[in-house]
Image (cartoon, rainbow, N blue to C red):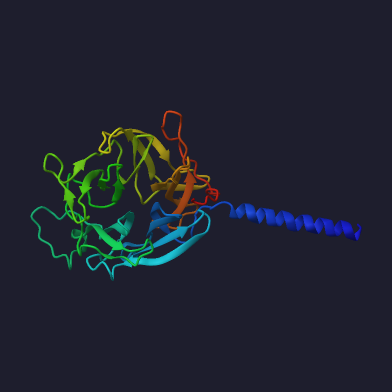
Amino acid sequence: MKLNTLVYLFLVAVLFGCESENKTKEFSGNPIVEGWYADPEGVIFGDEYWIYPTFSAKYEDQLFLDAFSSKDLVNWTKHEKIIDTTVIKWARQAVWAPSIIEKENKYYLFFSANDVQRPSRGASFDPNNDINHFGGIGIAVADSPKGPFKDYIGKPLISDFYNDAQPIDQFVYKDDDGTYYLFYGGWKHCNVGKLNADFTGFIPWEDGSLFKEITPEGYVEGPFMFKRNEKYYFMWSEGSWGNDTYHVSYAMADKVTGPYNKIGTILESDTTIATGAGHHSVMHPENTEKYYMVYHRRPIPNEGRNHRVTCIDEMYFNEDGTIKPVKITNEGVEAHLLP
């Protein structure tokens, strides 16, 4: 073989290798970051994508929250311990399921803590000694999406059980008229309340109640909402978060408060890729038809109850506005810069 032929083949190999590397870098890959993370909330602030997940570990080790930011969905920067239990003094374990929103140049981070349980009827308890009977949904605030965050009111925003909903898995939503709603609830019940102007409490509904129950068929936990073409899309997790039965279903309505009648499942296991896909959120760059589902799933093989990782796949719609089942992938999504 002549020398110039060898040189040619070498150059072809180099160019092919570079092309393959570039192709790899054009996709996020799944999972998108290293480590065990679950319950991710994806949100867009300015020209950056942000993801706020749960650090997936034993409750006694789940004492902080990390965040991740990206310009393109492919390259992610880790922001460690944007908040922890040294800042939230009443939170002593199981800090999880963050939800964040920007309002008047402040960033409000909502979270669950302590895995609050309903005490037995007539029982008394000491929150310093009986942690599972004290806790709920908290709120923190910062001047930047990366924090540092500080406790906003010094106690849970919601600590009691309303309509039998465990005060966990909150999602804050701003409607077109400027009203801020908080959706939340575990134990197969979902409530919605209207936040007051400074996020320190709730505006009562017409009947005087603070929370309206909107639980759809099959609901377990993990509510999320977005609006598209004047329709409200309400989404939630079903099954058990601790195993492979976890999946996501949804409903549509003309009003933010529903009623929400279940349409079907749109995110679930694919045993050739991963199982237990659930507790998700959706990111939508304005003025595009791009909708990204951010979710957690259980890798195969799975190393235990807390082995969950954060992934992104694209979400598509049918002509009638219903959502097509999301295909979970190892490739993830293509790079997409925000304007």
Q: Which residue is nearer to you in this view: 275 or 326? A: 326
Place of residue 283 in the rendered image (x, y in percent of width and height, measured from the top left)? 42, 47
| Number of residue marks | 0
Q: Which residue is nearer to you in this view: 198 or 110? A: 198
Side of 114 relative to 240 (left or right)? left
**Residue 34 in view here:** no
When asked about the image quadrant of residue 113, the answer is bottom left
Side of 312 relative to 205 (left or right)? right
Q: Is residue 209 above or below residue 26?
A: above
Give the residue furthest to the left: 122
Residue at screen point 42% across, 54% down? 46
Residue at screen point 22% across, 66% down? 90
Q: Is residue 140 above or below residue 178?
A: below
Place of residue 23 in the rendered image (x, y in percent of width and height, measured from the top left)? 63, 52
Give the residue furthest to the top: 320
Quarter of the image with the N terminus in it: bottom right
Q: Is residue 2 above or below residue 286?
A: below
When asked about the image quadrant of residue 175, the answer is top left
Place of residue 36 in the rendered image (x, y in percent of width and height, measured from the top left)? 43, 59
Residue at screen point 67% across, 53% down? 20
Give the residue furthest to the right: 2
Q: Is residue 188 above or below residue 80?
A: above
**Residue 33 in view here:** yes
